[in-house]
Image: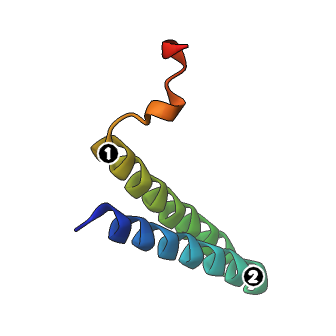
């Protein structure tokens, strides 16, 4: 799967996380569990972004040692 598609999936996961957070605020009994689940989904999205960044390699624009 190309990097752009993986980043799109990460973006979708962030949206799911946001939706779960909203539901957690509305639904008191399962609210805490939804908040935990939301954090797990958000962490998964972040990991996908890290994997893509590692696969792409260092960004020459961010290399401050070459100044």
Left/right placement of residue 51 relative to residue 29 reads left
Residue at x-position 46% and y-position 61% = 45
On the rendered image, what quadrant is the N terminus found in?
bottom left
Left/right placement of residue 37 relative to residue 19 reads left
Where residue 33 appears, x then y in whole percent?
Answer: 59, 71
Label 2 sits on residue = 28
Where residue 40 appears, x then y in whole percent?
Answer: 49, 61
Residue at x-position 55% and y-position 13% = 67
Q: Quick check: can you spot residue 33?
A: yes
Q: Earlier in the sequence, mark 2 or mark 1?
A: 2
Indicate the secondary structure of the residue bearing disc 1: helix
Where residue 59 appears, x then y in whole percent?
Answer: 43, 36
Q: Nearer the viewer, residue 32 or 53?
A: 53
Left/right placement of residue 16 relative to residue 28 reads left
Label 1 sits on residue = 56
For the view shown, which residue lies furthest in the left direction?
Answer: 1
Q: Nearer the viewer, residue 49 or 42?
A: 49
Residue 39 lies, with reference to residue 9, above or below; the image says above
């Amino acid at each position: 799967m190309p990097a752009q598609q993986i980043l799109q999936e990460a973006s979708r996961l962030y949206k799911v996380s946001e939706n779960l957070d909203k539901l957690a605020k509305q639904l008191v009994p399962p609210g805490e569990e939804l908040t935990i689940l939301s954090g797990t989904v958000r962490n998964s999205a972040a990991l996908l972004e890290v994997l893509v960044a590692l696969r792409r390699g260092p960004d020459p624009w961010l290399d401050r040692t070459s100044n």
